[in-house]
Amino acid sequence: MRVITLLTDFGTRDYFVPSMKGVILKICKDVHIVDITHEVPPQNIRRGALILWACYKHFPRDTIHLVVVDPGVGTERRPIIVRSRNYYFVGPDNGVLIPAAEDDGIVRVYEIEIDKISRSRKISRTFHGRDIFAPAAALLAAGIDVEKIARPIENYERSIVIERPRRTGNMFQAQVIYIDRFGNVYTNIREEDLEGRPRNIIVKLGPDDKVLNLPFVDAYGMVPPGHDLALINSEGFLELSTNFGDFSKKYNVKELDKLIVMVEY
Amino acid sequence: MRVITLLTDFGTRDYFVPSMKGVILKICKDVHIVDITHEVPPQNIRRGALILWACYKHFPRDTIHLVVVDPGVGTERRPIIVRSRNYYFVGPDNGVLIPAAEDDGIVRVYEIEIDKISRSRKISRTFHGRDIFAPAAALLAAGIDVEKIARPIENYERSIVIERPRRTGNMFQAQVIYIDRFGNVYTNIREEDLEGRPRNIIVKLGPDDKVLNLPFVDAYGMVPPGHDLALINSEGFLELSTNFGDFSKKYNVKELDKLIVMVEY
Amino acid sequence: MRVITLLTDFGTRDYFVPSMKGVILKICKDVHIVDITHEVPPQNIRRGALILWACYKHFPRDTIHLVVVDPGVGTERRPIIVRSRNYYFVGPDNGVLIPAAEDDGIVRVYEIEIDKISRSRKISRTFHGRDIFAPAAALLAAGIDVEKIARPIENYERSIVIERPRRTGNMFQAQVIYIDRFGNVYTNIREEDLEGRPRNIIVKLGPDDKVLNLPFVDAYGMVPPGHDLALINSEGFLELSTNFGDFSKKYNVKELDKLIVMVEY
């Protein structure tokens, strides 16, 4: 029983996602379909790439990750399949698949040959998720060889979703790379950028360059409710948070904001 | 392995949808349960019918489409099963099932006999999704004959979700039939209502009768970001859109708004 | 084929829930994963407990209910498994599992032994849903004996989510225990607290102690659209509602508000 994951910016209020699932099940019934999320902000390739990168690796070997964040649908951008060491990635050639696939190790990139996946059906110009990507993923899940439906290509679009922070001593010019539903603010500073365990994190942020001095702790519950903190989160990033609160709203922080971070050991 | 789809106005924050899924799995474990959507606006039969119509046909033959948009729950409205050429539809007799079932071709309509699906359990007056419709769908999925749990009826509620536009030459008195999460505005003008490929679409819309002249293109990405356009969408309707934008918010367009559309060839 | 349900406050826009599903499927593929909800308000243990209590029992015997509403993640609070008469419950020892498990009948409570479920992987301090609870649930689904991964304990956190109303004759000092997506207001008065069928429900509620006289009916559709009503809902509680409307918004009622309810027979 193979696994196909779905990651889109389609939301869950329309007929888009279930249409894709129907198409998949028509081709291959012996499959687990798992939603990653459909709440990627419309056309936000960067966020789709980052979410995929954060969770692709927890799925079983040979899982097919199907991603449709696709502002270029119907234009010249190509539909592709990326074979990495342990997974398949199916989606548009706009960079959204690449950070995850590169993290796993890209083996080969293919362009989907549309005439080989849907001889009979009409292909719309606006919904390749249903008409091209879902059939391609389902055919892979059914065990068809990738080279039967796609041809190897050499070039593809790349995307960089996490830039490295710039560092001067214990001071980082950093960036907000992600804000989760709890309002936790992920910086692009990784655990391995630190020199041992910090005592405090001093950060300058927000529209009016507010300066905060945050205790560095192991878990949210280590400070009283409503207090701010910094920690290394489950993805290995330095995170700014408020226990039982929403740090990003409290300080009006947005994704891609710049931060100055000073680490006190 | 049979497929049951779920389409409701229950949202996903309460215990309603999982209660239905639990009931289904208790009766029939060998089933794929697929959410169509649960975000139909409360009691909006028309929108439920339209979403069902747009995606029912992509599912495998003999899929059971279970729909609960049911403002009349607990009153005299009947619980029904519609057998169409390729599918079963289970839900209230309020018209929500009919546009999809008619599109597929209705074979027979049945009233569910409540005493035959739940001898033992108490039937609530407010949650037939859990107490009547889910067991009925699960029994069908388990292979029980529809006539064992329902009796044929001759009359049922109809609903018209898409009215035909009125046409004078190249001018249409049209209507907004759907607005998707991207803010794309679906008119009730179909591809086959056009006489060849338009050059431009001139449209009068919104609360202050704004007039727009939109290029007719094949795909969103054919105009620069922020620009408006018209195209034939994946469901075959003339759609008004903004590339990388939300057309419906930009021009304050609502579902069921009237439109004047002039097609320039 | 076993069933694992997921109930969290993680929302559906991030990588949290799919990471847990991936971990589960890596350990045990022969499983139905069913979302209860992920829209529990952040850290709201009471609401998570109540939703679990309302739907756990509709699932097949031996379903594993996995719950992550876990403000104490990474602190001293213990990860536990509760074996009840018909189900397993997996989650933090903060009371969230207990009302459902007690309703079913608790057989034994266990503390998960972390070193026995993930010898190799690093355990984060902020995402035990992925690193502890999901593997534990998947191992149970795969048929491993609970005592292989957890040891019996005697004490655990309790929580009371529904307090009994105080009663004087036909007058109740009651409480709002739940408000659903439709704005229906659930009181803590149960059907068995009533002495036969009421004629009217007089209720004092909201920020300015508004007094309403509501007809007691069987179903929403028994009053005209826009009219208020009271009924016994599908969970057996006295509920205040507006047909085709949102009672809670109309009268500005919040969860845990106090109510004075007078029953007229």
Image (spheres, coloured by chain):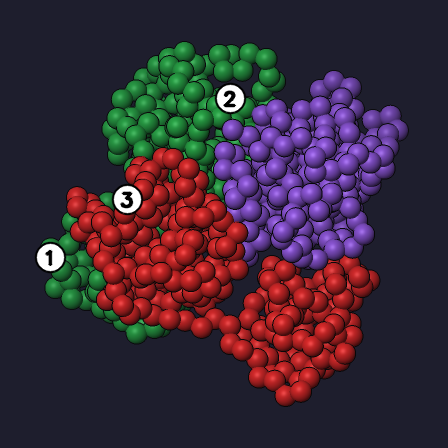
Chain colours: A purple, B red, C green
Callout 3 secondary element: loop
**Residues at badges 1 and 2 in contact (C-beta under 8 Å)?**
no
Same chain letter for marks 1 and 2: yes
Within 10 angstroms of label 3, few (less than 14), some, or many (20 or more) residues? Answer: few
Residue B66 horizontal/vertical position (percent): 39, 52
State which chain disc 3 sits on. B
Q: Is residue C166 left or right of residue B46?
A: left
Q: Residue at x 21, y 46 (%)?
A: B118
- Residue C49 visible (yes or no): no
**Which marked residue is nearer to the observer: mark 1 or mark 2?**
2
State which chain disc 1 sits on. C
Q: Quadrant of residue A123?
A: bottom right
Cα distance between the residues tagged 1 and 2: 52 Å
Q: Is residue B66 left or right of residue B246?
A: left
Give, as a three-letter code, the residue at label 3: Ile
Cα distance between the residues tagged 3 and 2: 34 Å
Mark drawn on residue C27: 2
Q: Which residue is mark 1?
A: C196
Same chain letter for marks 1 and 3: no
Quadrant of the frame with the N terminus of chain C: top left
Q: Residue at x 60, y 41 (%)?
A: A6
**Which marked residue is nearer to the observer: mark 3 or mark 2?**
3
Q: Residue at x 25, y 28 (%)?
A: C105
Q: Which residue is mark 3?
A: B144
Q: Is residue C2 above or below residue A226?
A: above
Using the image as rendered, state which of residue C161 and residue A27 is in the foreground: A27
Q: Is residue B216 left or right of residue B30?
A: right
Residue B246 horizontal/vertical position (percent): 68, 64
Using the image as rendered, state which of residue A235 and residue A168 is in the foreground: A235
Using the image as rendered, state which of residue C154 and residue C39 is in the foreground: C39
Callout 1 secondary element: loop
Q: Quadrant of residue B71?
A: bottom left
